[in-house]
Image (cartoon, rainbow, N blue to C red):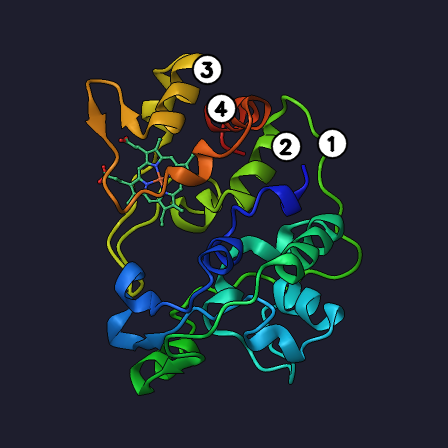
Amino acid sequence: MALAQKPLVELGRVAQHGEARPAVQAEGFGFIGQLATENLTPAGKLAGYTDGEIFRALRHGVDQKGHALGMMGALPYRQLSDDDLQSLVAYLRSLPPAATTGPTGDRINFVGLAMVGAGMLPSEPPVDGVVTAPPRGQTAEYGRYVATFGECRGCHGPDMTGTPASALGPAIPDPRPLVSTLSQAQFIEMMRSGVRPGDDPFPATMPWQNAAAMDDHDLAALYTYMTAPVE
Ligand code: HEC
């Protein structure tokens, strides 16, 4: 898997659009303050970052000065391998520079800060040392890794068993029961088309386009993971 060719994580997607958009619109974090997703093209905030500093931002969720980067600390991207983070840095550097058009920087208000202090916003445990990806294969282990870079675990929870309603938004369902009723081919077809069995399209809150851009191998591994027993 080379993330450079698969800009599937939020960072890649925002950067690809070449614009900063207020995530508050897309993600509904309004009442904890405004969370702006940065312009990550070479003309944006990362112009002053070294490659190592971008790597550190992805791995540890901190900015150049070591300050926590809002939501980045709550998302599982720090589990991406060193190789894939390096590919992601190279990808960001390769983007055509685009002017910043929206607000930048997290503006978490008092309620948000109080929630961070009270531990109400989730935070991923720190990761030390070299991180390697599981071998690319039709295994649940590799499929779990696909669900990490494909963003699935960021929304559906660390084990893909759904997340209850919280300060961050409404409940997100456990997708495993539905997936377990499908064949691998039906699952791949659903993720490519964005339409569930029974002609039931995913709503806009479910970004199936991430998965639609994956190749058959990675989708099959994702299926293996989602139909394997939860550890
Ligand atoms: C931004 C949050 C978000 C991300 C990222 C996300 N999902 Fe979802 N997903 C949702 C929501 C919300 C629903 C419920 C949609 C609805 O109301 O029917 C959903 C529904 C589903 C369903 C249908 C469940 C059912 O019983 O109908 C499947 C399958 C699914 N997601 C798989 C995935 C996979 C695989 C990924 C990663 C490629 C993924 N999701 C990434 C938010 C997300």
What is the number of the mark on residue 223?
Answer: 4
* Residue ID for mark 2: 142
Q: Secondary structure at mark 2?
A: helix
Spot occupied by residue 34 in the image (x, y as percentages of width and height): 32, 77
Marks 1/3: CA–CA distance: 20 Å
Pointer 3 local density, CA inside 10 Å: few below 14, some 14–19, many at least 20: some
Whichever of callouts 2 and 4 sits on the residue coming sooner in the sequence is: 2
Amino acid at pointer 2: Tyr
Residue found at x 65% / y 57%: 94
Marks 1/2: CA–CA distance: 7 Å
Residue 119 visible to an observer of this rendering: yes
Q: Are marks 4 and 1 in contact (CB under 8 Å)?
A: no
Q: In the image as oriented, which residue stretches furthest toward the right? A: 130
Camera-side residue of 92 and 65: 92
Q: Ligand 1 near label 1 (Cβ, under 8 Å)?
A: no
Query: Ligand 1 is in which quadrant of the figure?
Result: top left
